Image (spheres, rainbow, N blue to C red):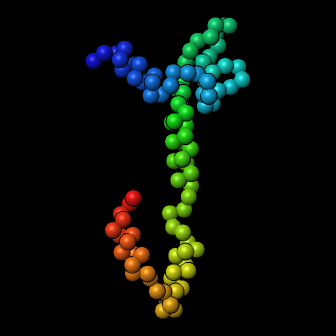
Amino acid sequence: MNIDRIQSQLIRLYGGRTSNTRGADQAGDAGSATTEGTNVPGDGFVLSDEASSVRRMVGVVASSPDVRTELVNQLRSQVQAGTYQPNDEAVAQALLAGDE
C-alpha cells in the first residue's frame, strides 16, 4: 500500500484544515499545547463540513420520538369506537410503491 495515497485520500475525505475545529480555545487550535513558549502539537481531529452536518442530523434523529403519540392515540380511539375506515386503495398503493 502506498502511504502517500492513503494519506491524501484521508485528507480529501476528512479535510486537512484546522479551522472550524470543535473545542478550540481562544489561545490556539484544539490539540495544541504550549511548553516554554514553544507551540507543541498534540493529538486532535478536525471534522469536515460534511461530517459535521451528518453529526448534527444524527443528533436530530436521535432526539426525535420514535412514535407519533398523538396520531397513535387518535387511531386507537377510532378503532375502539368502530369508526376507523382505512382507505384500502391508498394502503395498496403505499405497499406497491415501497420506500420510494
In this rendered view, identify the residue nearer to me: 2 or 37.
2
Q: Residue furthest toward the left?
A: 1
Residue at position x 55%, y 21% in the image: 17
Instruction: Report the side of 68 relative to 87 (left or right).
Output: right
- The quarter of the image holding the C terminus is bottom left
**Percent of width and height locating residue 48:** 53, 30
**Percent of width and height locating residue 84:** 48, 86
- Above or below, 38 against 42 in this view is above
- Above or below, 44 against 100 in this view is above
Instruction: Report the side of 55 relative to 35 (left or right).
Output: left
In this rendered view, identify the residue nearer to me: 87 or 52.
87
In this rendered view, identify the residue nearer to me: 51 or 42.
51
- Above or below, 68 against 79 in this view is above
Residue at position x 58%, y 22% in the image: 18
**Percent of width and height locating residue 79:** 48, 87
The count of marks equals 0
Instruction: Report the side of 44 relative to 37 (left or right).
Output: left
Residue at position x 54%, y 69% in the image: 68
- The quarter of the image holding the N terminus is top left
Q: Say which quarter of the image contains residue 25.
A: top right
**Percent of width and height locating residue 74:** 55, 80
Residue at position x 41%, y 19% in the image: 8
Q: Residue furthest toward the bottom?
A: 82
Q: Residue furthest toward the right?
A: 26
In this rendered view, identify the residue nearer to me: 65 or 92.
92
